[in-house]
Amino acid sequence: MCLAIPSKILKIKGQMAEVDIGGNVKEVNIMLTPEAKVGDYVLLHAGYAIQVIDEKAANEIFEAWEEAYNALQ
Amino acid sequence: MSSNDDVIILGHGSGGSLTNRLIKDVFQGAFENPILNELLDAAVLDIDGGKLAFTTDSFVVDPIFFPGGDIGKIAVCGTVNDLAVSGAEPLYLSAGFIIEEGLLISDLKKIVQSMRKAAQAAGVHIVTGDTKVVGRGSADKVFINTAGIGVIPAGRSLSPRHMQPGDVIIVSGTMGDHGLTILAQREGLSFSTPVESDCTPLNRITKAILKAGGESVRCMRDPTRGGLATTLNELAIQSGKGILIKEERIPLRREVVGACEMLGLDPLYLANEGKVIAVVAPDAAASVLEAMRSLPEGEGSVVIGQVIAEEEGLVLLETELGATRVLGMLEGEPLPRIC
Amino acid sequence: MHSNKKEYARFLLDSIHREIDRPITVMEVCGTHTVSIARSGLRELLPEQMQLLSGPGCPVCVTDDLDLDMVMALSRQEGIILATFGDMMRVPGTESTLQQEKSKGADVRVVYSPTDALQLASENPDLQVVFLGVGFETTTPVVAAALDQAVQLGLKNFSVFSLHKLVPPIMRALLEDPEVKLDAFINPGHVCTILGTEPFRFIAEEYGKPCVVAGFEAADILEALLMIVRQYREGRPAVEIQYKRAVRPEGNPVAVGFIEKYFQPVDARWRGIGMVAESGLDLRDEYAQFDAKKRFPLDIQPGVRRKKCSCGEVLKGLKLPYQCPLFGKACTPAKPVGPCMVSTEGSCAAYYRYGRKKAGVSS
């Protein structure tokens, strides 16, 4: 249980934020992540941001994996 | 415990296994005849030495206007497409309207104009129709029922029964776009997306497929409600063969992937209204693919898998990790999840 | 999968095969992990010495059937809109489902977020909106945040029927159960996004078992399994985070604060398992006006529990789904008997959907 997906904050209006989820735009609530800023990536669950997350990892750019891969060699 | 057996639930209309059970339990037994029992997209009728394809469909989509189309456009394209994938040249349609009291006539005119444009694009004529009006609340704005007829050239026979192990499975483009567009309009789920319905007539691309592949084309389907997964399952069951698909080959728009991840849905179960699946013998696969890609409605065509001898009646998905798992049929209505 | 990710996953798999030095039974307690494992097919690629069990990680599956009967009875009342996450619609109580109640006329609405339920309350001032709160600690702060908004808005027609549950107590109960044999846990990634690792330290410190917080891609799960193998090789059971991109050791204290503000721990019934102490959440007394259980107390005839299905044993990892006598025959996703089959994240549903065994076969 825990369908949560990374999304990028485009705009903030008080308790709400407009986020980009893979090219779709949705309004979500950011009361649980008061420190979130425009440009941050947040984990989205049931219409609320539940954590600010590492941008590099949120994009799953293969560098993140490449680093880990090299570290484990 | 009272079960899904005593009342109709929304899931019965979703195109998956509940729908199939309803058809078997309620309709098939009552209307019993060998033509109906084939359960193809269009009935193939022997008429005085020739063959006619005959299909019927009802359209109840909500909202009636959506990015990329409206209920009228789907009504024409959906009917044309059922005929087209059966190997027929679509010729004539009927259109029956059940209209809820209170619908704006300007909306009805918009829908009818859409139908005119779609019919023109497909080269078909709407030759007969009917109109009924019901009281407010007895229908949802407008329902459209259609029937369509087309001619199948002598000697052509498309059927899952012709499928053989080694046959190649091709899809004409990205999956789930229409289903996602409709979902995005739903109250409470609203999010804005650049994705639009892919609704379009398929008779031009099916003609190209048949021209390039001839008798090497075993059968074609359009993966409407229930999505790619459900249609592949129907092919597997009706052919008595297995199907193996490579997950990473299935074309998906990133917005569709993102929205489905957010809602807990699987794009392989979302409807398509402008895509065709072609099952083709391996010798003709390359030329069919080229013919499909030369058309705008087929530029994203790719081979996604093949027919196999084992696992009769099942669709298997080779995952990105290289393991295989079953890709089942849709059961009830897909619901957004948090888990 | 990016080709690098795929190579990395294969590398992890090979490493697990090379480095595992003893039989290890790992349990995951997150329905989303159950599904990821089933969908990626990785179970069949793991070494034989590694067994992956699915525990009671699906909050939908462990919702008690008598509790659900109460919710359904509420939905049948005039003037009540029952708002719920989609996951709960097809879960059977003792007799019916919310889906069936809806088709018989109950006002049941599927929502994606509790925000939508708040909206329903604002738009329907003459009706009472009851939101069915189900989920572990990933979801509970979200419902608490919605309650906070209800307080801010001064809503008089919004309440929550809380069937929320907690993960650490059920893990302790499993570790205390002599019948349950497990050597390590994969921790639910997003529950730990909220809670951090502190509430799980007892698993390594008191019970000496490795516990790794894992993400949801196949590569995440494989990496976590490798970390478990290495903890055993090096004899250092600990709580580690594999899912570093989304989990910090301190979790999200703001979210935890919301849970603590609005909810209090209570004993709770877990379907198939029974009563587990302090493992559920009810609204705090000072928020009684938002507590549907207190606002709409109903006296209903308790339904008769179905006994034949093995959901309880499956949930504890004592039986594999196809060892249940009903699996694939009387109990299928289209006609589910127990919740393990009806929830898309239930063990039985995952085995049925993604595995080849369609009827009870012992291998």
Image (cartoon, grey):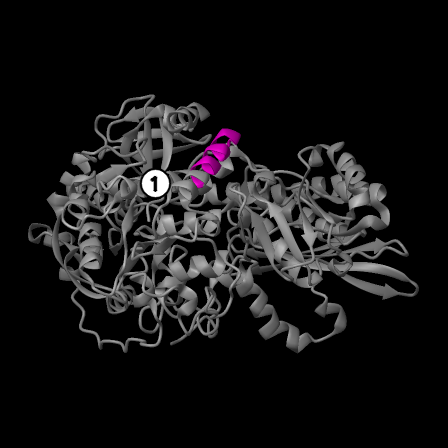
Res. A50 image quadrant: top left
Q: Main secondary structure of the magenta part?
A: helix
Res. C345 image quadrant: bottom left
Q: Which residues are magenta?
A: C2-13
Give left or right: position of B257 versus B228: left
Give left or right: position of C258 versus B195: left
Height in image: B60 above or below C205? below
Residue at 24% x, 32% y is C248
Q: Position of residue B257 (x, y in %)?
A: 49, 38
Q: Nearer the viewer, residue C349 or B153?
A: C349
Residue at 78% x, 58% y is B162
Q: Nearer the viewer, residue A72 or A15?
A: A72
| Viewer can see residue C142 | yes
| Viewer can see residue B144 | no
Which residue of the protein is positioned furthest toward the right in this rendering?
B49
Q: Mark 1: which amino acid?
A: Ala
Taking the magenta stretch, the answer to whether it contains residue C10 is yes
Q: Position of residue C283 (x, y in %)?
A: 13, 53
Q: Position of residue C83 (x, y in %)?
A: 31, 54
Which residue of the protein is positioned furthest toward the left in this rendering?
C286
Taking the magenta stretch, the answer to whether it contains residue B6 is no
